Image (cartoon, rainbow, N blue to C red):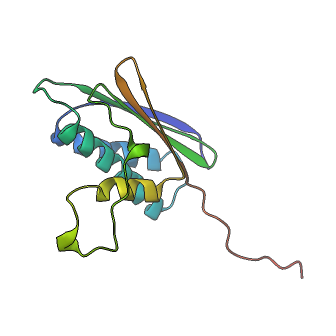
Amino acid sequence: MGKMKLSITLKNRLSDLDRIKALVLKMSGAVDCTRRKLKEIDLILEELFTNVVNHGFKDNKEHDIDISLSCDDRILEIRMEDDGEPFDITASPLPDTRCALDKRGIGGLGIHLVKHFIDECRYYRKKNRNIIVLKKNIAEKNLQKTDSK
């Protein structure tokens, strides 16, 4: 595993999604992480960012969205901050995935995926900013059993 800290400030425009991919790519060079987990991290960041851009602001002004990634050995911490409308991801109800697609309400699947791929999620609001802190174990478990003889 490796230690690293990266941060980026994006604007509330979908064209900044490419910068998230670049951030994940940069992270992949600094920590030991499987491709699968990198894809999960990319999905998490894209989903959170897209939700903020599409639903977080009632005005047409430009806003900053701050994302930081830090890793200490086995745990990746993702922190996202924005000054949009209050939205507590931890209070968001899970969609009924057993229900037929044509009977389901619109939305909620992205948040469901985010929650599925992380190990810990916290939300708080401070100084009119949404702050989401996610933790994900990126270490691969050693599934091989070793024999002493």
Q: Residue at x 39, y 53 (%)?
A: 114
Can residue 17 be seen? Answer: yes
Given the current orientation, which residue lies at the most extreme right position?
Answer: 149
- Give the side of residue 124 with respect to residue 71, left or right: left
Q: Position of residue 140 (x, y in %)?
A: 60, 62
Q: Residue at x 37, y 51 (%)?
A: 44
* Whether residue 107 is situated above or below residue 17 in the rendered picture: below
Q: Position of residue 75 (x, y in %)?
A: 59, 47
Observer-nearest residue: 89 or 11? 89
- Give the side of residue 145 with respect to residue 20, left or right: right
Q: Position of residue 129 (x, y in %)?
A: 35, 24
* Whether residue 99 is situated above or below residue 80 in the rendered picture: below
Observer-nearest residue: 121 or 49? 121
Given the current orientation, which residue lies at the most extreme bottom position?
Answer: 149
Q: Residue at x 26, y 38 (%)?
A: 52
Given the current orientation, which residue lies at the most extreme top position?
Answer: 127
Q: Quadrant of residue 43?
A: bottom left
Can residue 26 be seen? Answer: no
Q: Residue at x 17, y 36 (%)?
A: 13
Q: Position of residue 100 (x, y in %)?
A: 24, 76
The C terminus lies in quadrant: bottom right
Q: How many marks?
A: 0
- Give the side of residue 19 with respect to residue 75, left or right: left
